[in-house]
Amino acid sequence: MNPFFKIDERIENASDRAIKLCKEQFEIIDDITEYNQNKVQKAFIDNKISEMNFATSTGYGYGDSGRETLDKVWAQVFGAEDALVRHNFTCGTHTLAVALFGVLRPGDNMLCVTGTPYDTIHNVIGIKGSEMGSLKDFGVNYNEIPLKNERPDYDAIENAVNEKTTMVYIQRSRGYELRPSLRIEEIEKIINIAKNKNPDVIVMVDNCYGEFVQKKEPCEVGADLIAGSLIKNAGGGIARTGGYIAGRHDLVEKCAFRLTTPGLGKEVGATLGMNRELYMGLFYAPHTVGEALKSAVYISALYENFGYDVTPKYNEERADIVQSLGLENEESLVAFCQGIQSGSAVDSFLLPEPWDMPGYDSKVVMAAGAFTLGSSIELSADAPIREPFYAWIQGGLNFHSAKTCSLLAAQKMFEKGLLKGIDYGI
Ligand SMILES: *Cc1c(COP(=O)(O)O)cnc(C)c1O
């Protein structure tokens, strides 16, 4: 019995069964975590990180050696020539936009080969029309290749890439879709096909939610440019804001010219005391991602045992930290999110309710008790209130607290008579 939280014995028993199922996956995750932790550790040692690198700068931020060395460490970890890691990136979308605007020019052709990209990128590209300030508005052409049976359509990619293709764009994570995420081996295959058709093509990968989930990162298999958010995987739950771009030196420089100005590039940018937590976040990231993965695997096993549709399943190979659960109706989604929130270290007393979130066509309920607002490397759950009534769950700073949150979610559903797979003895 848990001395701190009231959880029905039948749910505790289901939890014990789930833990047994997870054993093999946990070993696989531990192996990946240790590999990536050593990779990060080696980069810190090779770059002689010391207290000096945590010093702050103000004003222009000229000669901030902590900032400059962080870029070097980052580049080494991600198998890239260069990197641009900054707290000034406001979110993942902003970082991806800087990268796209940084390297694409009027008349260029961008080709997304993993179906329609993540929602917030639509306005950046100008998918729906020519949204003000979008790439389309600036004369960059866009095309996409849909997935085939939820996998990249390699034949269609081979046919579509030609000497006119400037950029092939790949999204590693599934985002808020019910398809599997893209494994690094699949990314490598796309890159080989694309480069074979056009050796000059720039391959860019939206790396959000994918960092440290496998042993390799996209630049290690030939990607030219990657970008991601620091309040997801790569910030390790420590970074409070920011983003990163990494890849070929000439491309990263172009991105730096876009973030600041041509000429100034990476030379400016006061770090305002952020260096220490960005280093520390990177150091924690492989472990934190491992905890988030264990949380996802466990939640998948537990809720599949109760009788719900889950994707991915506990024993499926993963390429991002996202887990989804088909909870079948509005009442269950709300109870689930309320249960998750009730176990959060921060804002446990808030009761999530469905609301009309801007930019969504249905109400959304979300649980997001976090040290960093909106952080999704911390345990968070969100669910649009519409068919097929799926909740999307990601993160977990540590497995133990995420486990308890998911048990509290089951308990909340149980108390409302909603939890499947439990004999209510009526
Ligand atoms: C989160 C995410 C983004 C955008 O990041 P924000 O920080 O929410 O702006 C882009 N692509 C994918 C795949 C993501 O998961």
Image (cartoon, rainbow, N blue to C red):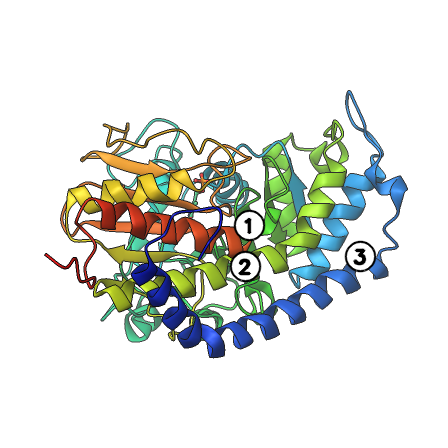
| Picture disc at residue 397 | 1
Residue 164's place in the image compared with 191, above or below, is: above
Mark 2 vs mark 3: give the one in front: 2
**Which three-letter amino acid code belongs to the residue tagged 1?**
Leu
Which residue is label 2 attached to? 291
> Quadrant where the C terminus lies?
bottom left
Q: Residue at x 84, y 42 (%)?
A: 53
At mark 3, the secondary structure is: helix
Q: Residues within 10 Å of mark 3 (few under 14, many from 20)?
A: many
Q: Which residue lies furthest to the bottom in this view?
A: 24
Mark-to-mark CA distance, 2 and 3:
22 Å
Which residue is label 3 attached to? 44
Q: Earlier in the sequence, mark 1 or mark 3?
A: 3
Q: How crowded is mark 1: few (under 14 residues within 10 Å), some or many (20 or more)?
A: many
Is ligand 1 less than 8 Å from the beta carbon at label 2?
A: no
> Are the two marked residues, 2 and 1, in contact with CB atoms closer than 8 angstroms?
yes
